[in-house]
Image (cartoon, helix red, strand yellow):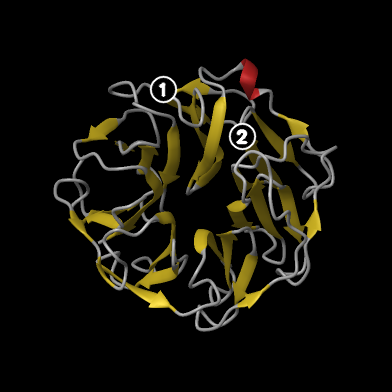
Amino acid sequence: MSGNYTICVGTIGTGVWLSPDGGDSWKRAGGDLWNEARVFGLTVHPREPRSVFAGANDGIYKSSDGGMSFMRLDSPMNDMDVWRIAIDPVNPDIIFAGTRPAALYRSKDGGRSWQKRPAEIAESCPNVRIPRVTALTVDPSDHRVVWAGLEVDGVLRSKDGGETWQRIPLSGIPDPDIHDIAVTVNGSTTVLTSTPREIFASNDRGDTWYPLMVKEQFKLGYCRHLAQKADDPATLFVATGNGAAGDEGAIERSTNGGRSWQVMNLPDEPNSPIWNFATHVADPGLVLACSHYGELYASRDAGNHWAKVPREFTEIRGLAWVPN
C-alpha cells in the first residue's frame, strides 16, 4: 500500500508518527510536539494540503510541512487536552477547538489568538467523569452552522458561526454519549450523529432526528467515528467494535447515504474497535482506518479492498494523510 503520500498517526503517549512513503517507513514528528505527548486529534487544512493541526494534552499545534514538524500555537488551551479541531471551509482563518474539560474555543486569525465561546456544558458526568468534546464539524453547505458533540453531554449547535450555542434536546437524540458528527451534502444536507449503539440523522439541521437503525444491520454494534468519501458524500464509513475497550472491530460502509450497509472484508481481525478514519480530496479513493490499539488499514478503492499497514503503534486517537 505504499505511495506518494504521508500518513500522520496521533498516539497516546508517543506523540505523532509519520510515514512519508505511504507506510513503508516511519519516524516521529519533530518540532515542539514532545515525543511522549498524548495526541487526541489531527485535522488537515482545507486549502493548504500540507498543513496539519494536532490537538494534544498541552494545547494545539500546527505543521506546515506535512507533519514533519509541529509548532505550538500559544492559546488559552495550553494546559488543556485538545480533543477536536475543525476549520471553516469557506474562511479557513476561522478555526474551532474542543477540549477536555469540555469547552469550545474559536480563532478568527488562523490560530494566532483564541476566544472561549459561551456554551452550557456539564462539568462532570458518571461515564467519563470529566466531559470532553469528541465531535466538532462545520457545515460545508452553510459555514455559519457549527456542530459540537460531547462525551458525555449531548449535541450543541451554533447557527451564527460559533457566537452562540444551543443544546439539542434529548427527545431528538436520546443518548448524550456522542462519539462523532458528520454533515453530508448530497442534494440536501444531512447531519449524522454517532452514539455507542446508534446513528441518528437530521434533514433539517437538527430540528428533528430519526435513528438509522444500524444496531439491526451492523456486525458489531458499538459505533465510533464517521467518515465520507471526499468526492461522494453518499459513501459513508462507520468505525465499529464490540465495546469501548473491546477486542473486535469492523468497518461498515454505505454507498447510499446510510440506507443500507455492508461490513468490509479486512485482511485480518482487528485487535480492538476500529476508531478513526482519514480521507483527503487529493485522492478520494484512498481511505485509512485505525483500530483503537495501534493497527492501521488502508484502501485505495474507497473500501472495496483493504490491506494492513505492517507497523503497529500504541493507542491511536488521531489519523490523517496528506499528499506529498
Q: Residue at x 44, y 61 (%)?
A: 57
Residue 17: x percent and y percent? Answer: 26, 55
Number of callouts: 2
Q: Which mark is residue 62?
A: none
Mark nearer the viewer, 2 or 1: 1
**Left or right, residue 275 beside residue 4:** right
188 above or below 101? above
77 above or below 266? below
Residue 8: x percent and y percent? Answer: 31, 54
**Residue position marked by numbered label 1 in the rendering:** 248
179 above or below 66? above
Q: Which mark is residue 257?
A: 2
Q: Residue at x 75, y 69 (%)?
A: 118
**Left or right, residue 148 beside residue 263:** right
- Inspect this view and state whether residue 281 appears: no
Amino acid carrying label 2: it is Gly
Classify mark 2: helix, strand or loop. loop
Q: In the displayed image of the protein, which residue is found farthest to the left? A: 25
**Left or right, residue 319 beside residue 263:** left
Residue 258 vs residue 124, the one in the foreground: 124
- Inspect this view and state whether residue 43 appears: yes
Q: Mark 1 or mark 2, which is nearer the start of the sequence? A: 1
Quadrant containing the N terminus is: top left
